[in-house]
Image: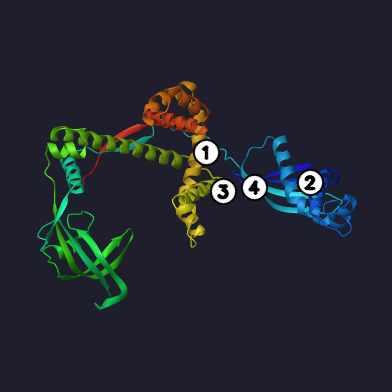
Amino acid sequence: MEVTIHETSGVQHEIEITASAAELQPHFDKAYVEYRPKIEIRGFRKGKVPLDMVKKLYGDLIENDALNKIATEFYKQAVKEREIKPLGEPTLIDLKYTRGETAWFKIQYDVRPQFALKDYKGIKIEKVVHRVDDNEVESEILRLRRMNSGTTPAETASGEEFIVTCDMQDLDDSGAPLIGQKRENIRFYLADEQLEQPFKDALQGSKVGSEHKIKFEHQHGDHAHSVHTQLKVKKIEQVSLPELNDEFVTKITKDKVATVGEFRKGLRDDLEAYWKQKMERQVVNSLTGELIRMHDFKVPDSLVRSVLEGLLEETKNEQPKRQLPADFDYEQFSQQNQAYAVFQAKWALLREELLKAEKIEATDADLEQLAAAEADKIKIDKDRLIKYYKTSDQIRDRLVGEKLMNSLVASATIVEVEEKKSRV
């Protein structure tokens, strides 16, 4: 077997394999035996046709049919003998075969890019600091009171704490109703911060039976579209917020908190924990992005495809019966997620090199410590959890990833920047 390797790019190679008739014959003999049970010839029981007759009548067909499989076997042999470490699945891009003579195969495969780590210690990263204030705590309390509110019928929406139920008829530019564009019983909570101001302005002071035309430009992402609609008020309800007292606190916390003071403190602690985690995640994301920017190398297509396939599986899992809609556009899905897939594939390669440089691994002691911390939370016996963790590649990967990021963050220069809060 003659083998020639061509480096077509830093991440893609081609291997040419030439196999002699003698090297091909054992593979063809195996193919004859596998094909024989399928052959029916008058005068012979099915699968009992002599091999010589099989070769004479169907040899050319069988040999050509077997070439793809044979190419894969020769490729695997060449990869093993030369200690090549390909990525993903190879692609047979060309073959030539003359019966009784040699076969020639050209196979394309991806390899890991070769790159040197830049000096990644001391990278400057901004950390946007969010400080929880009294207004944020009070806003959260108000949200919880609204979640536990009641309603009473009203004739007029005389403030924000009202829910107005309307039929909504879309109109064309001239003000005429658009056929088929009527929606019934749409509820508008006037205190909802997400409700667009034109709706609030129109429905403030509205009465049951009143009609209101609204026209404005709705901004959606990077584009805008016109909204022209007519609302007919069918029902108005006044929202009755529960009083903030110890009884309310005891009820919504299921007796875990007894006083308003404790409740406020607990909310502040929860908000601070939430923002602390979010700020730490932002630092990790910024650091990862900067590391990617520092290291310019090409990513193998097979890795990008692998990430896209993983995203597609996640999308399937979100669908009923794991089935994508009949009109699902795979090409559009791939295009929309291409940049993300390239980023993730690049980070996977860079992460491996950083793990080597930092000499990070998940030890049994790390796994035992993790199991001890998580056993009570997930209600599993610690020893049983330790045993599982020691056999789980996923858990080891998670641990080394956390240790790597902790090490990278510790070596970075973090500059704290106060968050700019919007003024209302």
Tell me, yes or no, whether the two marked residues, 2 and 4, touch with CB atoms within 8 Å. no
What label sits on residue 301 in the rendered view? 3
Per the model, the C-alpha gap separating discs 3 and 4 is 14 Å
> Which residue is at a point 33% across and 59% down the rendered structure image?
222
Tell me, yes or no, whether the two marked residues, 3 and 1, touch with CB atoms within 8 Å. no
Amino acid type assigned to the residue bearing label 2 in the image: Thr
Left or right, 361 with reference to 197: right
Which mark is first along the chain, 2 or 3?
2
Decide which of 361, 187 is in the foreground and name it: 187
> Which residue is at a point 34% across and 39% down the rendered structure image?
282
Of discs 1 and 4, which sits in the foreground? 1
Colour scheme of the rendered structure: rainbow
What label sits on residue 349 in the rendered view? 1
Of discs 3 and 4, which sits in the foreground? 3
Local SS, label 2: strand
| Residue that numbered label 4 is attached to | 8
Which quadrant, please, contains the N terminus? top right
Q: Position of residue 67 (x, y in %)?
A: 76, 51
Which mark is first along the chain, 4 or 3?
4
Can you say whether 230 is above or below 25 in the image?
below
Amino acid type assigned to the residue bearing label 1 in the image: Leu
Amino acid type assigned to the residue bearing label 4 in the image: Thr
Residue 422 in sight: no
Amino acid type assigned to the residue bearing label 3 in the image: Asp
Tell me, yes or no, whether the two marked residues, 2 and 1, touch with CB atoms within 8 Å. no
Per the model, the C-alpha gap separating discs 2 and 1 is 33 Å
Tell me, yes or no, whether the two marked residues, 3 and 4, touch with CB atoms within 8 Å. no
Per the model, the C-alpha gap separating discs 2 and 4 is 19 Å
What label sits on residue 32 in the rendered view? none
Q: Quadrant of residue 402?
A: top left
Q: Position of residue 99 (x, y in %)?
A: 85, 53
Residue 224 in sight: yes
